[in-house]
Amino acid sequence: MHTQENSTPAIYINTDRVLSCQDAPAGPVRQQSSSRKRRQAPQRVYDKPGKKPAIPCESDLLTLQVLSKQRGGQDFAIDWIPKAFPKGVTADALKRTLSEDEINDVDHDHGFRLSQAYDGFLEKVEGRFECGLCTEEKRANWKNKKDAIRHFQKFHFGIGDTCGTW
């Protein structure tokens, strides 16, 4: 009886050169540190129905300006009140499109070109639209300027739509 020997050569693997998936870098390795500074993201403000009561409507523009000043509004926004509401404080007046003359007469840099009446109460800071009628430390802000309309109606002019369900 003849015994056949296995003639397959042994394969040796050098385990010192094999990297595990956990040790491998997750992408290109940066050789220099970033010069950009991380900034704190602005706090988001949500006007949840029923959480805060709406302010009472004030139709007298001078009284509205005084109240806005007492609540901590900024001068540019307070000065804009009579320009935004030439025929009275209404939701339609807040959303109306401005004429070219009104746009050209603006003396404050808002960080964007105004197009509607409520734009005069906003200021663009770090890519977000901030309310100029809120106090400095609690300024509401939005990514899209049209989201500010409901805030102005409810918390600054008292002309918001009321809902009995909430």
Image (cartoon, rainbow, N blue to C red):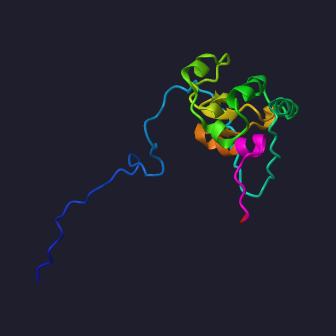
**Residue 107 position (above or below residue 125):** above
**Residue 99 position (above or below residue 129):** above
Q: Is residue 7 magenta?
A: no
Can residue 38 be seen from the camera position used here? Answer: no
The C terminus - image quarter: bottom right
Residue 65: x and y, percent?
82, 30
23 sits left or right of 63 in the view: left
The N terminus - image quarter: bottom left
Can residue 92 be seen from the camera position used here? Answer: yes
Residue at 26 percent of width and 57 percent of height: 11
Residue 106: x and y, percent?
64, 18
Q: Is residue 163 magenta?
A: yes
Q: Residue furthest front?
A: 87
Q: Which residues are magenta?
A: 152-164
Q: Residue furthest bottom?
A: 1
* Observer-nearest of 107 and 41: 107
47 sits left or right of 37 in the view: right
The answer to which quarter of the image holds residue 108 is top right
Q: Give the mark count.
A: 0
**Residue 79 position (above or below residue 163):** above
Residue at 58 percent of width and 24 percent of height: 35
Q: Residue furthest left?
A: 1
